[in-house]
Image (cartoon, helix red, strand yellow):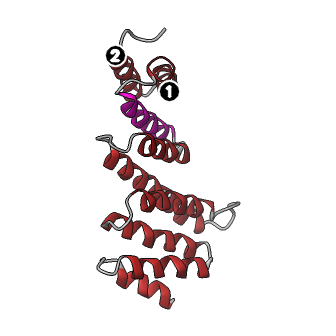
Amino acid sequence: MPKETAELQLEYARTLMLEGDYRKAMRESDKFVEYYGNDPLADENLYLRGEIQMKRNDLMTAAKSFQQLIAAHPDTERYHDAIAKQYEIGDMYYAKGERLSTKHFRLFPKRPFKRAAEVYTMVVDNQPFTPEAAEAQYKVGLCHYARKEYIDAAFEYQRVVEDYAASDWVNDASYGLAL
């Protein structure tokens, strides 16, 4: 059974996450959705779900949970936090791709770069024409370059140069185009 109020249910799930019981925390978060889905705290529950999924190392699902939060609750106070978490997930995938690309015995070593590009694209789509989006757009180009998708990388670098001309990333994108 759920807790008596939506706030108690949310806090219980958060407590379980902090204790490291991610499976049970996710179940309690599911109960929140089932019993209190239309409560004003629904955005906090979505954010918590994304955090739990990150702790469980289910990064793409977490990025999609944050995306769902942004789409369903565009006026939430967690909007910028969710975008920051997506950016963090993109960086985690990119770092994983760099680690795997140095190991030659690994199957599908370029897959993390593909996922990083997907998450960075979410960041760009959620807040276009911001300094964070300029960096994310540049990193999408880096991901394509790492996957040896040079035409796609050039397209993404060109978007940085054209869409974010005042950005600090224009020089790096221009260098990427030259490569």
Q: Which residue is mark 1?
A: 26
Left or right: residue 4 versus residue 68 is left
Q: Give the residue at x 59% y 62%.
A: 114
Whether residue 54 appears in magenta in the rendering, the answer is yes
Highlighted magenta segment, given as a residue range: 41-56
Rendered view: 39 above or below 151: above
SS type, badge 2: helix
Density class for disc 1 (Cα within 10 Å; few <14, some 14-19, many ≥20) is many
Residue placed at 31% from the left, 77% from the top?
167
Q: Residue at x 41, y 56 (%)?
A: 126
Nearest the eye: 84 or 32: 32
Residue 58: where, in percent of width, then height? 54, 42
Residue at x 40% of width, y 37% of height? 47
**Percent position of residue 146, x then y:** 56, 73
Q: Which residue is mark 2?
A: 8
> Would residue 52 appear left or right of 58 to someone viewing this image?
left
Decide whether residue 128 is among the magenta residues. Answer: no
State whether residue 46 is above or below residue 114: above
